[in-house]
Structures are given as structure tokens and as C-alpha cells.
Amino acid sequence: MTLQNSLRMAALIATWCAAVLLALGSSTFDEDNEEEPPPITVNFDVSNRGDVRILDGITADTATSFTILGSFEKAANDRITLRQVPVLLNTGTAWAAGVLPDDPENLLVGDFVAQVTDTLEFGFDRQPAFGQFSSDLDGTTTIVTFSDTGDDVTIQTGTATAQTLSFRNFRDAADDTNRDVDLRMASKAYGLLENLWLVTRISETVHREIEQQLSMLQSIGLQTNLDLTCDNPMSMNAPTYVMRWLNDVADIGNAGNGDNFSAAWRNCLIDADGRWLESEMEIENFQLANDANPRSMSYTAEARILFFATQELEPLPSPAENQERVNGDIVVSASEELSVTPTQ
């Protein structure tokens, strides 16, 4: 090969290599700069079907009515889950309950009506960053405002001088017999809202498990136990978590929408909710459309004297009577907000 041909070949090779590198660089640049779809808003609605009773050995609270309305944002391709933190509770959120003392020395008794009066940034086991709710006891209204600049909570009862407490002291006020009764009931109202949201989250955990186990539940058949795994550390009291497909309502032969399912726990830790669970919950009218657009879900959850705790529960036959527990039905629905395409 002549020198001239060699030089020409070298030039061609250099040109080819440069083209390849340019193409690779362009491809990498395009991948790195590919825009992710914007987050999607999910709207949710939680309400009661009949009375919901929550007891803790100090008071017996009966929620006679409640509607929890709110929203949160999630990644466009993620499934719907109510375990988002935080969520925004809007001004349509309202709840009412009767409070009776289990402990005769507690002396907190009466009926309250509460409502969110300014959008409440609400999270599980955490202080709201901002927002406001009111609690009415025997015609006296207490306004509770959460600060977006610090840890303080401002409480205004009627025309009295407003007072400021830390969030911890506000949450503990319900059980403090030295506090004013209106403040105590406002604290109780907030605690009840937290517990109603906790039960909602637990029910959605069951809904998610049903979704993941549909094919297995269908393969083993109706009224057959499916053993699942708890998140317990090493424990002397062995945990159990059993799920069952109770009845085949809608699509005969297939486990899915319209059917009823149950979950039963014994000393079972669920990490996702940070609680140890005992007893049962039934999911009725299971509805799932997470593969549709927009995604949605709905169901009714029946809690059957469901015990829950932040630490290991006592062995059977039952946890201690002063352990928090709930009994009643809640109706849950959530759906992605339809995006509107701007007109040209």
C-alpha cells in the first residue's frame, strides 16, 4: 500500500471513529436529558359506615361521623398508596365523636364536632407544617393553628387569650387533667383524626397485599388460608399473618374486583405502618384499577376489634384492655386527577 493510500485510509478511519463518538455522545445526552413526566395529584375520600369506636383504656371514643378529604402528589408511574407523607387535608374534612372516660379519674367527657378550617399539611406520627382546625364542645369553639415557622401550636378558645404550646404538649393535653377541658377536647379531636388516618393506612396496606397476592389467592381457592410474613424481629411470641379470599362476587372463578377478602394478625409487626397488629380486618367490595388511566382504587374496610401498638403486643387470648383498639367500618376511595391538555 502506498503512503498516499495509507494516509487516505487513516483519514477515513479517523472520520468514522469521530462519527461513532458523536452518535454515542448524542445518544447519552438525549438519555440524560429525557424529561420525566410531571407528578400526578391523587384525591382521596375516607368516611365511616356506622359508628367507629376507638378505645385506649383512658377514654372510649365513638366517631359518629367523619369525612377525610385531601390530596397528595406522586410520581406519574407509581401505584396509588395512602402512605404518602405528607398529605393535604382540605376544608371539607370534618369529624364528630362522643368521648366517655374509661378511667374515672380522667373526667374528659362530651361530644365534639371538628373540622379543618384551613388546608392542613398532615403526616403520620409527625407535626403538621401548617394549617388549622376547629373543635366545638358545648357551643365553645377552639381554634388550633399549626405554625409554618416553628414547632409551636397556637390554641384560641372562644374569646380567651390565645396560648402557645409545643406540638408534643398539645398532643398530650387530652390526658392532662390539669388542662382546660376545651383544650383537652381539641387535643382529643386531633388524636382521633390521627387514629382514623392510621386505620385507613392499615386498611390500604391490606388492599395492597391483596393486589399482590390475587393470583395466589385464586390458585388456592375460596376460604383457604394464605400464610404471609410479618416484619417481627426475633420474638418469643411467634407472629402470624393470614389472608383469605372470602367470596367470589363479581367475575366468577377469578379473584378480583367486587370480591371480599380478610386479613388476620397475631402479634404481627407491619413495618410500613410502624405498628404491631392483632385481630382481623375484612376488605369488602375490593376495587382496583391501577393498570388503568387514570389509576383509582376503592373498598370498604371492617375492623373487628383491631388492636394496634408501637411495641410488641401481649400474648393471646387478647392484649391488655388499656391497649388501643378500633372497631367499625370505613369506606376508602382514591383516584388520580385527570390532566387537562391545553388547547392549541
Image (cartoon, rainbow, N blue to C red):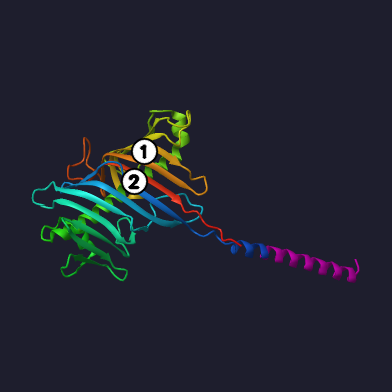
Give the CA separation, mark 2 to mark 1. 11 Å
User: Residue under circle 1?
Assistant: 283
Q: Residue furthest right?
A: 2
Q: Earlier in the sequence, mark 2 or mark 1?
A: 2
Q: Is residue 224 above or below residue 155?
A: above
Number of numbered discs present? 2
Callout 1, which amino acid?
Ile
| Amino acid residing under circle 2 | Ile
How far across and down, in percent of the image, does residue 67 sit? 31, 50
Q: Is residue 280 above or below residue 183?
A: above
* Residue 15 covered by magenta stretch: yes
Within-10-Å neighbours for mark 2: few <14, some 14–19, many 20+: many
Q: Work out which quarter of the rendered image holds the N terminus and state it.
A: bottom right
Q: Please give the range of residues in magenta.
A: 1-25
In the image: residue 291, left or right of residue 269: right
Q: Residue at x 78, y 65 (%)?
A: 16
Q: Residue at x 22, y 49 (%)?
A: 97
Question: Does residue 144 show up?
Answer: yes
Q: Secondary structure at mark 2?
A: helix
Tell whether position 274 is magenta: no
Work out whether residue 270 can be spotted: no
Residue 80, x across and y down, in percent: 44, 49
Q: Nearer the viewer, residue 210 or 312?
A: 210
